[in-house]
Image (cartoon, coloured by chain):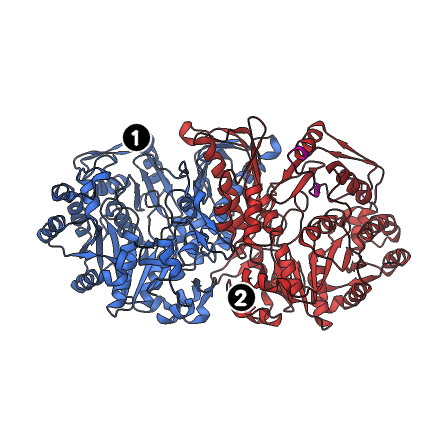
Chain colours: A red, B blue
């Protein structure tokens, strides 16, 4: 019987974080310890490293996710461990998990089995306080906006058009739609409002794109918090909030160092949504890791149509990064689901269902090729997978000219990823011809349509009239030259979660558009995106416990 | 020209926190570092010390506060430094500041001048994350309550009678009165609600009274979150939230170690309101300090009528602590204000105004005597104070049989508190005959009336009918035997902030009563208590900034 993730994590013998830092050349004085096994890296070090050569960057992405799961984070951690076992100086860069969802259904988010980052409980709960700092900075700005309106409203902010929402790192559905400012004139100006979960805050996206405190502060100043009665944007800079916000975020900007179960150093830093934001860990962590290690393995949210697209068109472009290879994670179970098989029948061998699911894998492969990246398919193995099913995938990948490697990193740790590691090293050696998909000089609509047609396979794009109008407004405000960040269901290439496989020729509906002027992209919503989750009938929180020694149970 | 607090703090040469810990016998392995200058002390150490002998406990309290300020925290820090200069093994125990008010008017709260705890910016901003953990635990419980109602409401909670509010560590007036759960049936059950500031949470009061994770968890389970349609209390235990709340709070329970500008070790841990809660730092920090040091100097919120009363009747009683002496801080300026002098005339010498203000000082002295404590008056000196004014106070104290010492710890650090230190040591040597003011076996009304008459000087107590009814309800629920925690304006002994000096014979109005079943006291409100502050027209946040090196300005 295999142990649970938290049991494996708690049995692990961790090395002091200073030792992990030393193993990749971080001097002890540049580590700010948070207990013995977590540390922040000083911004001084990130600056000193800036002119050092950079290692190779490997993106781990996945086919369209299904409830069956693909194991993207586990593969990322396992691949990093495998590269270390192969004698390479390797690092891992991951997003930091949100506390809220740990209390709901999801449990932790720090890899799984023998490919986890540790200390698992700390990473999943408060970690080094980054998300709390984001909450504070976000909500300080919100309080200052409402205070400005209350104290005479010199800027003429229309209370009906405040777009800056409050956030909380908790799944709390009753805060989605609220009315604030009730109770009489001493208690503010009443208006409709709502809370998002913290990771949905533009402050999170900014943390992940900023390269210094100054850059972060300038981005904060550009955040649009609302509009005046005559439709002029009002920014956080107009409210004079950027300095205090940056003061609250000065430590959050420092990358967090932890280790994997096999003592491979890992930065876990920043975790923006992969729909309304770009879904990757921080630029500062990735760049610093590339200066410290020869191979850096990182991941991006959801499937490759969302996560990899944004990693390649937003993050790498902004950060001047040149990725060297992409690993596309697939599972036989998820391909069977994409092939129309029911969730409760996935342990039956069914090569035909795998075959029917293949177009999803192949579409992601051909998409990634458009960015000029060498690709390796990682087949994340489960006990019920059969040789016949595997052969379907191997044949298809051979035909597509893409190497495929089995991965058993969940049960075997780095050892289970040695074949994958070797194939990734070979792919890196082939060299990358990375380029983004589209030019920033295109109009916003042209950019949207390029992604919709080239990546999603859409035939046409249709715009709701409000979205049409807002696109023009955004271009009129001078933000036409930024990347677009499309929010779409991850379950399908289309905007209809029921369309599995590789649908094409469909119409993509753009329902809403908004500018994240601080992050520096236009968010394009193709459906309702839930930015504040709810708790299930029996939340995970009911089962979480801690004993008198501080030993946590039930987190996963 | 004297430097500002933040300038002094930033010029300070700090010692590594491991060195500070070693100076009072804390082994390095029992310190969990948060950067080089902050650490949490392991709960293992707090348990191991439990049977060690205890040092002397000195409470610093004050006359009724005025806008002129008394310098209670500064005196506490300065006295600790003075005792160290006198060769004593001394420690300081303070409350941790709330981040929200730093962004409003108040600036930091870590002492002042040359009697500060450092690193000042960290202590005032996120520190070690305790307040964020409280916010998370509090709001998890709130989300679970609303989720329970949404998911079938098996317990029959009346949505109109949910008493557990959400919290945020921010001054945000529009959140005082809100309506949540709007937007249709998927978004919860609509109801009136509101946010308090985090320090007002019962979770904070519990953190400060719990002696172990188990005790904290049991207290969480007892929290009353609302009432059923048939008026039965519903607890956090009924919602199964206590385990996850305790998991979120497991590190917050560990005392935080920092140092003063003169390297005296200080625990800064917990900071509940001094009106709706008991206003003292954590029991665990105070007890641990008493096991480590020979003299522990601590403070309590507001003036002695509120802070000292609760310290002596709630904290010391619950924690089995025996305080050895009380220091009563007074300033000539505040006594002049209590004597009716206008705020803008305080720099004029006016011995008659001091004389008119004396009854306030004398009432606090005679109150403290009722607890059997030796008392020293600390006269916190300002440049405008004159010898004639000082003599008024010295004569009055001589007549009351209480030693008085000048303190210049703000400008001189510990050296400015040597006379105070010597007098405190002499007072401690006299021995204390501490006993709480009232027996827990009295009825709730008898307890309220004892405090009102003995401490405040009230003639009678009047109860609003709802308060009268709730007192009976609380006794019917079985909570008649707990201490009472009276929320009253700190500006006056009475419930009318305009009545300065030492009013007597007045009627104290009890407007509202509620049970904090987890903390273990009944809160008695004698007026409107603001549990969510607002920002001023020009919040301090507008002036706070940080440069690229992480150097913060404008925090004070």
- The picture quadrant where one finds residue A45 is bottom right
A530 left or right, relative to A375: left
CA separation in Å, label 1 and label 2: 60 Å
**Closer to the observer: label 1 or label 2?**
2
Q: Which mark is residue B464?
A: 1
**In the rendering, at what x and y percent does residue B74 appear?**
29, 55
Q: Which residues are magenta?
A: A475-504
Q: Which mark is residue B299?
A: none
Q: SS for tag 1?
A: loop
Q: Residue at x 75, y 34 (%)?
A: A509
Q: Residue at x 53, y 65 (%)?
A: A31
Q: Is residue A92 magenta?
A: no
B512 left or right, relative to A437: left
Number of callouts: 2
Assess disc 2: are there few (<14), some (14-19) or many (≥20) residues with their C-alpha within 10 Å of its C-alpha.
some
Magenta span main SS? loop
Residue indicated by mark 2: A30
Q: Quadrant of the N terminus of chain B?
A: bottom left
Write down the chain letter for disc 2.
Answer: A
**In the rendering, at what x and y percent does residue B162 appear?**
46, 36
Residue B359, above or below B398: above
Q: Is residue A478 magenta?
A: yes
Residue B464, above or below A221: above
- The picture quadrant where one finds residue A43 is bottom right
Write down the chain letter for disc 1.
Answer: B
């Amino acid at each position: 019987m295999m142990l649970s993730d938290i049991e494996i994590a708690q049995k692990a013998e961790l090395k002091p974080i200073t030792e992990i830092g030393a193993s990749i050349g971080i001097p002890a004085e540049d580590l700010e310890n948070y207990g013995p096994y977590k540390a922040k890296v000083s911004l001084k070090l990130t600056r000193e490293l800036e002119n050092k050569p950079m290692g190779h960057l490997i993106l781990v992405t996945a086919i369209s996710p299904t409830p069956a799961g693909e194991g993207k984070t586990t593969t990322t951690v396992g691949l990093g461990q495998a590269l270390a076992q192969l004698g390479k100086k390797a690092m891992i860069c991951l997003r930091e998990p949100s506390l809220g969802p740990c209390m709901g259904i999801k449990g932790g988010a720090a890899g799984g089995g023998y490919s986890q980052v540790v200390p698992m409980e700390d990473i999943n709960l408060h970690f080094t306080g980054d998300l709390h700092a984001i909450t504070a900075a976000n909500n300080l700005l919100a309080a200052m906006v409402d205070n400005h309106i209350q104290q005479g409203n010199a800027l003429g902010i229309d209370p009906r058009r405040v777009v800056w929402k409050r956030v909380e790192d908790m799944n709390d559905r009753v805060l989605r739609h609220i009315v604030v400012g009730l109770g009489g004139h001493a208690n503010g100006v009443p208006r409709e409002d709502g809370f998002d979960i913290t990771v949905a805050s533009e402050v999170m996206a900014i943390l992940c794109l900023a390269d210094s405190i100054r850059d972060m502060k300038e981005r904060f100043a550009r955040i649009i918090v609302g509009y005046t009665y005559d439709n002029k944007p009002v920014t956080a800079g107009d409210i004079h909030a950027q300095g205090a916000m940056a003061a609250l975020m000065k430590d959050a900007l420092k990358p967090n160092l932890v280790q994997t179960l096999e003592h491979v150093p890992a930065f876990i830093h920043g975790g923006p949504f992969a729909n309304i934001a770009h879904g990757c860990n921080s630029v500062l962590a990735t760049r610093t890791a590339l200066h410290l290690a020869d191979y850096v393995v990182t991941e991006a949210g959801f499937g490759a149509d969302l996560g990899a697209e944004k990693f390649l068109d937003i993050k790498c472009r902004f950060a001047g990064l040149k990725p060297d290879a992409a690993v596309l994670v697939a599972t036989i179970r998820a391909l069977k689901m994409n092939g129309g098989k029911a969730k409760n029948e996935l342990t039956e061998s069914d090569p035909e269902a795998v075959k029917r699911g293949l177009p999803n894998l192949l579409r992601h492969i051909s998409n990634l090729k458009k960015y000029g990246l060498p690709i390796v398919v990682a087949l994340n193995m489960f006990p019920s997978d059969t040789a016949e099913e595997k052969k379907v995938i191997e044949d298809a990948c051979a035909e597509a000219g893409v190497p495929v490697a089995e991965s058993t990193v969940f049960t075997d740790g780095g050892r289970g990823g040695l074949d994958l590691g070797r194939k990734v090293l070979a792919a890196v050696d082939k060299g990358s011809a990375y380029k983004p998909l589209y030019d920033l000089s295109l109009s916003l609509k042209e950019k949207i349509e390029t992604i919709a047609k080239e990546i999603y396979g859409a035939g046409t794009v249709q715009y709701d009239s409000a979205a049409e109008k807002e696109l023009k407004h955004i271009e009129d405000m001078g933000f036409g030259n930024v990347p677009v960040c499309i929010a779409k269901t991850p379950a399908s290439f289309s905007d209809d979660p029921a369309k599995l496989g590789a649908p094409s020729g469909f119409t993509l509906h753009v329902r809403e558009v908004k500018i994240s002027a601080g992050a520096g992209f236009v968010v394009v919503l193709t459906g309702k995106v839930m930015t504040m989750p709810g708790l299930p009938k029996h939340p995970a929180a009911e089962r979480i416990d801690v004993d008198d020694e501080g030993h946590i149970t039930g987190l996963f």
